[in-house]
Amino acid sequence: MSNLIGEIAFLFQRLDWLSLVDLALVSAIFFFVLSLVRGTQAAALLRGMILLVIVIALLTSLLPLPAFSWLLRNTLTPLLVAIPVIFAPEIRRGLERLGRAGSTIISAQGPSPIERTIAAISTAAQRLADQRCGALIVLEREDQLDEYVETGVRLDAALSPELLLQIFYVNTPLHDGAVIVRGERVAAAACVLPLSTGGTLSRGPDRQMGLRHRAGLGISEVSDAVAIVVSEESGTISVTHNGRMIRRLDINRLRNILSAFYHPPAPRWFPALVARVFSGLERLRRRAAGD
């Protein structure tokens, strides 16, 4: 124990500003890697690899195993080559994020990607509502929705009002199901979502709502996604988030709500503030319905 304390004290004595920069860079790399795989199937694989490395390190340090150590030394290089192959989707997603961030910094003119996404979705929702075409659009945020993307037809297409209108027009092959939007692209269409289990639609006038509204609430109960629902019967636009629903929205209110929710992660006070705004809008809606 005294030797361990002495080694720690020795390390702190040699600590300078360059060492702090070194530690900060390593920490940033680890944080970046973990943020890429969080919420994906690769997260479990990464945890398994870390656990395996810890077990191997303990075995080789505590026990004299020359053959095992030789095997590890000769397989280390192939393992390092295999890691980029295993985590190729996550690496590609991270590089795309860096590219989008760089282009945003370089180009200060024109609307941001988020503003373009909100404008496209709001315009499409209003047109669909005017034509009484049912629609369910899910905006992926921090929680990955890959398991629901797999239930539909992958598109990976650029988001536009025309594409959303074409998908949700009646009798088109992909109109039955949800569209999942990831960033500025339509990840998939005709996706199957979980239905709400919270009982929100079992009370009052909301109990007459159909499967689209129940699916919109359901995905908001199991993730941080925001769902836009257009009613085929009434032509009303609704938004669901965190197991709650705001109904009878016009295009301006829809844009304001999406601007509040559909943004990159912010400090901890921001979600609390947005939740308060959402609760206030819900209270106003109920008061207006009571009047």
Image (spheres, rainbow, N blue to C red):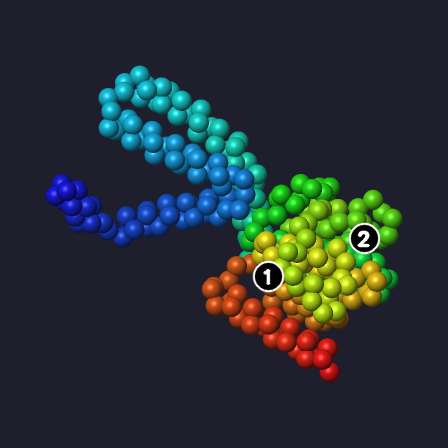
Q: Position of residue 5 (x, y in %)?
A: 16, 46
Tell me the quarter of the picture where residue 63 sits: top left
Q: Is residue 254 above or below residue 184?
A: below
Compared across the picture, whether 36 is left or right of 161 comes to left
Judge by depth and name the residue closer to the eye, 103 or 139.
139
Residue placed at 59% from the left, 53% from the top? 222
Q: Position of residue 178 (x, y in %)?
A: 73, 51
Disc 1 to disc 2: CB gap under 8 Å: no
- Residue indicated by mark 2: 168
| Residue 53 at least partly seen | yes
Residue placed at 64% from the left, 73% from the top? 282
Compared across the picture, whether 13 is left or right of 208 comes to left
Compared across the picture, whether 9 is left or right of 235 comes to left
- Residue indicated by mark 1: 242
Position of the N terminus by quadrant: top left
Q: Is residue 161 above or below residue 56?
A: below
The kind of residue tagged 1 is: Asn
**Mark 2 secondary-structure assignment:** helix
**Label 1 Cα neighbours within 10 Å, binned few <14 / some 14-19 / many ≥20:** some
The kind of residue tagged 2 is: Phe
**Label 2 Cα neighbours within 10 Å, binned few <14 / some 14-19 / many ≥20:** many
Judge by depth and name the residue closer to the eye, 193 or 165.
193
Tell me the quarter of the picture where residue 122 sits: bottom right
